[in-house]
Image (spheres, rainbow, N blue to C red):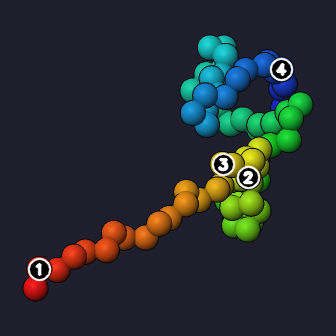
């Protein structure tokens, strides 16, 4: 089978890329993704512990500090 190549640059938007208008519908394509930045891992490869740890990345002690709790007010009962 004879293959032809076309090189173009595009930006993904909502997990899709736009093909040039010169690519007709119904043509079998082989897609190669190259990126200058690391691509995200698939959900199966993500580690919940790592994701939870990354939630606090960049936070300071004051961001995670609990407000001082004085408890409930003492209710006076009428006798």
Q: Residue at x 61, y 28 (%)?
A: 13
Q: Residue at x 77, y 37 (%)?
A: 31
Report x, y in % for residue 78.
Answer: 11, 80
Crowd tier of the residue under label 4, counting other residues whose Cα lies within 10 Å: few below 14, some 14–19, many 20 or above = few
Q: Quadrant of the C terminus?
A: bottom left
Q: Secondary structure at mark 1?
A: loop
What distance separates the C-alpha of mark 3 from that of mark 2? Answer: 5 Å
Q: Is residue 52 above or below residue 78?
A: above
What distance separates the C-alpha of mark 4 from that of mark 2? Answer: 49 Å
Label placed on residue 7: 4
Q: Residue at x 72, y 35 (%)?
A: 29
Instruction: State which tag comes first along the sequence, 4 or 1.
Output: 4
Crowd tier of the residue under label 3, counting other residues whose Cα lies within 10 Å: few below 14, some 14–19, many 20 or above = few
Q: Who is closer to the viewer here, 45 or 32?
A: 45
Instruction: State which tag comes first along the sequence, 1 or 3.
Output: 3
Q: Quadrant of the N terminus?
A: top right
Q: Who is closer to the viewer here, 62 or 6?
A: 62
What distance separates the C-alpha of mark 4 from that of mark 3? Answer: 47 Å
What residue sits right under mark 2 in the picture? 61
Q: Secondary structure at mark 2?
A: helix
Residue 42 visible in the current orientation = no
Q: Who is closer to the viewer here, 6 or 18?
A: 18
Q: Is residue 23 above or below residue 32?
A: above
What distance separates the C-alpha of mark 1 from that of mark 3? Answer: 42 Å
Label placed on residue 36: none
Instruction: State which tag comes first along the sequence, 4 or 2.
Output: 4
**Would you identify the image quadrant in which residue 76 lies?**
bottom left
What residue sits right under mark 3 in the picture? 63
**71 with respect to 74 (left or right):** right
């Amino acid at each position: 089978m004879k293959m032809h190549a076309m090189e173009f640059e595009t930006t993904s938007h909502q997990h899709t890329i736009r093909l040039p208008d010169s690519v007709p519908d119904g043509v079998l394509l082989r897609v190669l993704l190259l990126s200058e930045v690391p691509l995200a891992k698939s959900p199966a490869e993500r580690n919940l512990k790592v994701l939870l740890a990354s939630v606090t990345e960049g936070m300071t002690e004051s961001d995670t500090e609990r407000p001082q709790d004085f408890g409930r007010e003492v209710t006076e009962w009428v006798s």
